[in-house]
Image: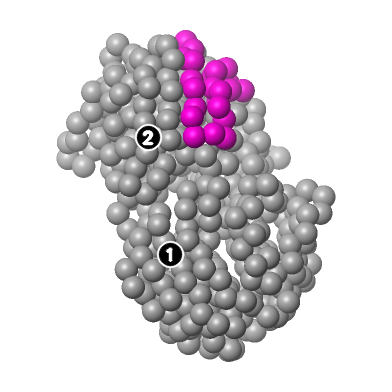
Amino acid sequence: MDIFQIEGPVRLSGSVRINGSKNASLPIMAATILAAGKSSLKSIPNLSDISVCGELLGNIGCKVTKSANGELCIDSTVIDNPVGDYEIVRKMRASICILGPLLARCGRAEVSMPGGCAIGDRPVNIHLRGLRELGAQIHLKNGYIIAEAPNGLSGKDIFMGGPFGSTVLGTANVLMAATLAKGRTVIESAACEPEIGDLARCLNKMGARISGIDSPRLVVEGVSELQPVEYEVISDRIEAGTFMAAAAITASELKLLNCRLEDMMAVVDKLRNIGVTVESQGDGCVVAGSGSIKPANITTQPYPGFPTDLQAQFMVLLSLADGNSVIIEKIFPDRFMHVAELNRMAANLRKEGPVVIVAGIKKLIAAPVMASDLRASAALVLAGLAAEGTTTINRVYHIDRGYERIEEKLNPLGAKITRENI
């Protein structure tokens, strides 16, 4: 098992290129199931979650290879095993994304209930409700979702809202299934995240007929078949936000390349309010921390609100603010396992239900800590950059799910991170 040893505090400087989006790549990889033939995807990051998705696609019959220039090639000519096996699906929640396309193409799918990060209850009932509206017969057996549509799917007006807002993966599943359904589908309260927009544009390039992209009302005119595609995914706004927070917490200046600020306005606005300079430059931006962090109140919300995937990173940043801050988690109310670990590093955090009160302190102190999920582990890396002493982070396999060798990106900028196998 790998660990990180991080020496701090440090100052960072230089340029870093942001990778393709993990959260866009996974559903787009699943979308290749819909079109028999060879698809080529560019800017797919080299992450453990991507490897799991490739393994999942291989298990259903696809041939997944990586070309010399880094493109991911998926040959979905043959789908002879429409089953999402538990041993693979349990590793990653986004595995559920194969349910819709498998059902649409094969008329049947068996997918294990998904696993993933331990960040609270995340039911898939809205996914199943949407697919039932399209005409699927669905039941659960031995931990598997069994979905059947022997006579094909039919378009329908579907409401996808849930108790915590729109569902991103649910929208992806229903959207993919609807592309091959007979007639017209309207998805109301669709997720508006940039990754859903990217999926929709990819599907249209495959021959789908989707309108209303980037809005909460998607209209899909079903087609009889889709074609393989060559497509490049958008950059990762969560990785970009993490590096922005790294610049802020270390009072440093970083240039981010391949960064789509138009997808990050809630994050940029919050950084500027905190006292961080963010300026657009070319295909990216320059982020500069002032060394003085103002307190702020953050409420996570569906896009275009503040993303839940940056809540933990900003909690670290605000722990060093000059005053008290409040963070309210409205997407995953239990997503606070990092609170106890940050308190081990001298942070002053108090959790009250879905709210954390952050009392600003002068400095963080290094300590051995445990990564509990993907974004919490990124937060601990940021804390290690700012803390006095050597911070040891255990279970860094979590961070490898969403950040491509983060230490190899941070160290050239001035970080002192060592990966060790114990």
Q: Pointer 1: residues within 10 angstroms few (<14), some, or many (20+)?
A: many
The image quadrant where one finds the N terminus is bottom left
In the depicted view, which residue is nearer to us: 116 or 156?
156
Secondary structure state at the residue bearing disc 2: loop
The image quadrant where one finds the C terminus is bottom left
Horizontal relation, residue 269 to residue 175: left or right: right
The residue at the point 17 percent across, 36 percent down is 141
Which residue in the structure is indicated by mark 1?
A: 328
- Compared to residue 150, the image places residue 49 above or below, namely below
In the depicted view, which residue is nearer to us: 49 or 120?
120
- Compared to residue 158, the image places residue 93 above or below, namely below
List x then y, in percent, for residue 134: 33, 21
- Count the numbered circles shown: 2
Q: Specify the amino acid type for callout 2.
A: Met
Residue 356 seen: yes
Is 205 colored magenta in this rendering?
yes
The residue at the point 29 percent across, 46 percent down is 123
Secondary structure state at the residue bearing disc 1: strand
Q: CA distance from mark 1 to mark 2?
A: 23 Å
List x then y, in percent, for residue 101: 41, 27
Is 277 colored magenta in this rendering?
no
Q: Which residue is situated farthest in the left direction here? A: 142
Q: Pointer 2: residues within 10 angstroms few (<14), some, or many (20+)?
A: many
- The magenta stretch is 203-224
List x then y, in percent, for residue 45: 60, 48
- Compared to residue 219, the image places residue 113 above or below, namely below
Horizontal relation, residue 106 to residue 202: left or right: left
Earlier-in-chain disc, 1 versus 2: 2
Q: Specify the amino acid type for callout 1.
A: Ile
Q: Quadrant of residue 414?
A: bottom right
Which residue in the structure is indicated by mark 2?
A: 160
- Compared to residue 291, the image places residue 149 above or below, namely above
